[in-house]
Image: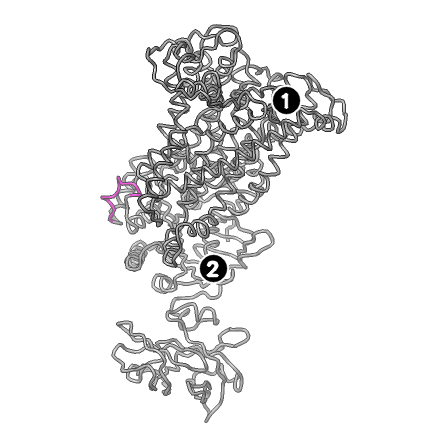
């Protein structure tokens, strides 16, 4: 038996390594620019960095100071109000539109892109448009007065107590069409034969939705919640363009807080600490979600 | 949604249908209103805006605000108009889009067709990076760009957008290639094609749709970005969004709303155009953002 | 030593061994079919021959060259996949010549080889089409063309017919057999369909649970299955297996079973069957193929021992060419195969003829064949 034991030849061995070599730059970039940077920022949050990074350890002092700041308190209260309303209103509008669009609507192909186009815009553009439309001196209020409705008043954007709701309004305008698309995809994925079976069982449209359809939309609800909440926490551009955080600090969010403390007020340690809190919040939502999604897909 | 059936078993009565159409049209008006208001007011003289109402058509049509926004409006200190910043955005977006799509395609190919021990973890790491609040990387990134001599430059912004775009592009291509028959790769291996040859000759020619998705998503995201532009660009490399914000929020002189609107539409135009031309792929990209392909 | 040697090969994923010491020699020109239920390891073995999966221990040799660690493209093999794996972006012609192109064959030679293969498979008119425009049968031909054009030492087929509809499958089966007879190529063919295995092969290896249960010609496998698994897996309808007891009566050995009333019945074995002596008085599992239980007129005239027994018919299933009759023996449903015009009625007693020459016996514990 002429057994020339030619173990893995060169080419085969190179081929075995190529995939890893090709993946390496992306993995390296991610390890440095994402995870390395996260660690660096976490480290900075424990130092007395001000205008420039410093490496003097101060323990939890930045976090203690952060939570004593009324500015930060406003920011997280605003985030809670903003995120809560944003998620709920987007979901309600999105679901309503999706259900309405799912009734064999003529011109669906025309309406759907109209609902969705704001998602293609920059938040800066959205902010510019709404800032002006909501401006009482020139926008909606002004227009109503010009039409002769003198008592019409809509000055939320100038009002400390109500300005945050204008941020909600503009954000909902931008994202609710996207939420609609997510729910519509979920609705279209439901087996029509199940619905026909339920109708033969005598279910009304109302009970059909409540008992059969909505329960099957759970994955869509979950996806919508996760995507919207992570968008809410990251929201920065819209506030900058719409209100600039004002009037006063009425519409500050953690994202704007972090930016101004780090880059304008030279309180880098506190800025880093606020960024860490933001990351933790996002991670608390995203990590379980991604874990479940990836596990399921095996 | 692409290709999904519009068939539904639900039946509704005529009065209910009228109500449904009414509601749908109302919502359509709500979504269209800001774009409509911006458009008509961008071709009005300033006096008509401050004196008239916002939904009235112009009595005098003028393109002056557009000319001004494009080439003469004051951005920061220079009366340059938005034109140079529009170019900045293009110079920033195109390379970053191409690079991140290219690497995303290779990564997706490796992760699905050449899987190895631990690849799931690596993918998880890449994926999570899509969802971090970028505030967490702003400080070290500013430092690193400075050290690399890329601070305040367009190449610096390209690097930033490339690095933080890989996660999403990898996700797209991974989901797409996961559905690509592995037997094809095996057949090509037996035929004698190597790693790159299989990618070029077998997978890439069938990747048109997902390349479109990745391209559009990346382009939209990078074009619309404000945070990185505001943090890492200087006056010469400012992207369009930052320039627009400067124009709109500058506190000197009279507020030329019509010029602001013309500028806003200019900033929105490229992504809107992409959306109108290839909306199908845009929606697919959005959907894939919820991880499920 | 054969043309293709699979020498003591095992495969493990981590601590789990999925193939246990597989030992098969294939001679040049043989048509070996690996058959077994899904998960038996047959596709893994094929992929190991192809080089698409590594070998944990043992050796695979083609023409005495050790293949362990050799890249698939350097083994001089070709493979036809279950999904055909035609490159969707290339025309039929490009699909067929892609392998030659990768191996650096000059263009005019590629064209010539492609023409020959296309003619052989009668796909000349399809050469400029894309796979998406072809029917299932046409794709199948193209996939075979892609393998043939390489003129490999060994052809590997991975369930190539399972995506075709029933009629086309039979046609393509015949074509593959014709092709093998004409070209005399060496083929390793994986299938879960025992009829494909029987009709195509010159040799069968039945696999189950990562073990090769039996190797042999189709006739050997069918007539003398080495264990209960092989006996029941090969053949359709499956072999009837009945609990029985070996008794000695009048110098003859017989199997004692019970009829539909629960009364004992004796079925004599032929005298040539001596291996059963040792089991006298003990339990066995009696295996009788459906075609060995017939109506008396349909019984084999040349058989040494044909026993007759009267039993209640529970179901009849006319299948056109044959009629399948279900009757209960030893508490189990037992299928008999009759001529189509046998007059048999459900719910009535009927006299069956049992060809005991064809009966086999298994040890109930080890499940190995005794005789």
Identify the disc placed on residue B190.
none
Residue C124 colored in magenta in the image: yes
Q: In which quarter of the image is residue B135?
A: top right
Instruction: Tell me where residue C109 appears, x and y as whole percent.
Output: 30, 38
User: Is C193 situated above or below B166?
Assistant: below
Outermost residue on the bottom side: it is C250
Separation of residues labelled 2 and 1 (CA atoms): 65 Å
Residue B231 colored in magenta in the image: no
Q: Mark 2 lies on which chain?
A: C
Q: How crowded is mark 2: few (under 14 residues within 10 Å), some or many (20 or more)?
A: some
Instruction: Tell me where residue A108 appears, x and y as whole percent.
Output: 34, 37
Q: Which chain carries label 1?
A: B
Can you identify the residue that label 1 sits on?
A: B139
Residue B67 in sight in this render: yes
Task: Decide if residue A116 is on the left or right side of residue A240.
Answer: left
Instruction: Tell me where residue C227 appears, x and y as whole percent.
Output: 48, 71
Residue B126 in sight in this render: no
Quadrant placement of the C terminus of chain B? top left
Helix, strand or loop status at disc 1: helix
Task: Give the magenta part as a residue range.
Answer: C122-132
In front: B170, or C244? B170
Instruction: Tell me where residue B205 appears, x and y as whole percent.
Output: 37, 35
Can you identify the residue that label 2 sits on?
A: C24
């Amino acid at each position: 038996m002429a057994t020339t034991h030619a173990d893995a030849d060169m080419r085969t061995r190179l081929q075995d390594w190529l995939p890893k070599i090709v993946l390496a730059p992306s993995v390296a970039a991610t390890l440095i620019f994402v995870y390395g940077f996260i660690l660096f920022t976490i480290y900075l949050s424990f130092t007395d960095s001000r205008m420039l990074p410093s490496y003097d350890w101060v323990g939890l002092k930045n976090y203690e100071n952060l939570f004593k700041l009324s500015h930060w308190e406003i920011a997280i209260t605003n985030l809670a109000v903003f995120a809560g309303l944003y998620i709920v209103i987007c979901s309600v509008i999105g679901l309503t539109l999706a259900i309405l669009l799912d009734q064999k609507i003529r011109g669906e192909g025309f309406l759907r892109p109209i609902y969705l186009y704001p998602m293609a815009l920059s938040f800066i553009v959205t902010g510019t448009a709404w800032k002006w439309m909501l401006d009482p001196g020139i926008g909606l209020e002004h227009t109503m007065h010009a039409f002769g409705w003198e008592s019409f008043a809509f000055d939320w954007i100038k009002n400390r107590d109500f300005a945050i709701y204008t941020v909600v309004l503009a954000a909902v305008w931008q994202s609710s069409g996207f939420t609609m698309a997510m729910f519509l995809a979920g609705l279209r994925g439901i087996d029509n034969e199940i619905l026909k079976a339920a109708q033969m069982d005598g279910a009304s449209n109302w009970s059909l939705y409540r008992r059969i359809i909505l329960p099957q939309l759970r994955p869509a609800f979950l996806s919508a919640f996760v995507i919207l909440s992570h968008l809410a926490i990251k929201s920065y551009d819209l506030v900058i363009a719409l209100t600039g955080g004002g009037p006063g600090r009425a519409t500050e969010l953690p994202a704007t807080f972090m930016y101004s403390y780090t880059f304008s007020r030279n309180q880098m340690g506190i800025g880093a600490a606020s960024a860490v809190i933001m990351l933790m919040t996002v991670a608390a939502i995203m990590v379980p979600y991604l874990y479940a999604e990836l596990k399921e897909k095996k | 949604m692409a290709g999904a059936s519009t068939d539904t078993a639900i039946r509704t009565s005529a009065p209910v249908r009228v109500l449904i159409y009414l509601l749908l049209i109302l919502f359509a008006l709500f979504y269209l209103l800001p774009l409509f208001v911006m458009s008509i007011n961008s071709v009005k003289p300033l006096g008509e805006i401050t004196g008239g109402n916002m939904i009235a058509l112009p009595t005098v049509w003028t393109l002056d605000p557009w000319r001004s926004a494009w080439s003469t409006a004051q951005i920061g200190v220079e009366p340059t108009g938005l034109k140079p910043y529009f170019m900045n955005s293009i110079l920033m977006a195109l390379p970053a889009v191409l690079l991140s799509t290219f690497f995303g395609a290779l990564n997706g190919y490796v992760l699905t067709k050449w899987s190895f021990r631990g690849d799931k973890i690596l993918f998880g790491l890449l994926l999570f990076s899509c969802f971090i609040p970028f505030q967490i990387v702003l400080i070290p990134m500013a430092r690193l760009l400075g050290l690399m001599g890329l601070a305040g430059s367009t190449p610096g912004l390209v690097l930033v957008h490339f690095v933080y775009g890989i996660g999403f592009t990898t996700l797209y291509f991974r989901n797409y290639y996961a559905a690509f028959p592995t037997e094809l790769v095996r057949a090509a291996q037996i035929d004698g094609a190597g790693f790159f040859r299989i990618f070029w000759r077998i997978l890439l020619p069938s990747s048109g749709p997902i390349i479109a998705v990745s391209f559009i998503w990346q382009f939209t995201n990078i074009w619309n970005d404000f945070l990185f532009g505001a943090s890492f660009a200087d006056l010469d490399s400012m992207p369009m969004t930052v320039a627009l914000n400067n124009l709109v929020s500058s506190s000197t002189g009279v507020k030329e709303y019509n010029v602001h609107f013309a500028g806003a539409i200019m900033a929105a135009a490229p992504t809107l155009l992409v959306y109108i031309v290839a909306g199908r792929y845009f929606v697919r990209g959005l959907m894939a953002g919820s991880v499920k392909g | 030593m054969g043309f293709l040697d699979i020498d003591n090969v095992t495969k493990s994923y981590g601590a789990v061994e999925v193939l246990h010491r597989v030992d098969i020699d294939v001679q040049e020109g043989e048509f070996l079919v690996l058959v077994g239920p899904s998960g038996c390891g047959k596709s893994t073995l094929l992929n190991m021959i192809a080089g698409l999966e590594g070998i944990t221990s043992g050796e695979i040799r083609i023409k005495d060259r050790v293949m362990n660690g050799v890249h698939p493209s350097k083994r001089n093999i070709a493979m036809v996949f279950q999904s055909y794996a035609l490159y969707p972006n290339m025309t039929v012609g490009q699909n067929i010549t892609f392998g030659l192109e990768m191996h650096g064959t000059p263009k005019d030679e590629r064209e010539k080889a492609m023409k020959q293969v296309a003619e052989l498979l009668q796909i000349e008119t399809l050469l400029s089409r894309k796979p998406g425009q072809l029917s299932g049968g046409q794709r199948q031909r193209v996939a075979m063309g892609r393998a043939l054009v390489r003129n490999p030492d060994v052809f590997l087929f991975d369930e190539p017919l399972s995506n075709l509809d029933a009629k086309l499958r039979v046609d393509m089966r015949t074509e593959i057999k014709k092709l093998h007879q004409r070209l005399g190529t060496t083929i390793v063919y994986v299938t879960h369909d025992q009829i494909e295995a029987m009709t195509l092969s010159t040799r069968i290896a039945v696999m189950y649970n990562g073990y090769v249960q039996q190797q042999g010609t189709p006739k050997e496998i069918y007539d003398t299955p080495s264990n209960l698994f092989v006996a029941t897996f090969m053949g359709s309808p499956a072999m009837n297996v009945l609990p029985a007891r070996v008794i000695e009566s009048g110098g003859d050995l017989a199997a004692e079973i019970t009829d539909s009333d629960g009364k004992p019945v004796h079925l004599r074995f032929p005298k040539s069957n001596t291996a059963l002596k040792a089991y006298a008085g003990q339990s066995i599992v009696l295996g009788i193929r459906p075609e060995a239980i017939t109506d008396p007129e349909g019984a084999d005239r040349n058989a040494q021992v044909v026993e007759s027994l009267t039993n209640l018919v529970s179901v009849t299933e006319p299948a056109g060419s044959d009629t399948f009759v279900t009757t209960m023996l030893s508490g189990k449903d037992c299928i008999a195969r009759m001529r189509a015009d046998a007059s048999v009625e459900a719910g009535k007693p009927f006299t069956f003829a049992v060809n005991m020459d064809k009966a086999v016996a298994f040890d109930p514990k080890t499940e190995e064949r005794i005789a």
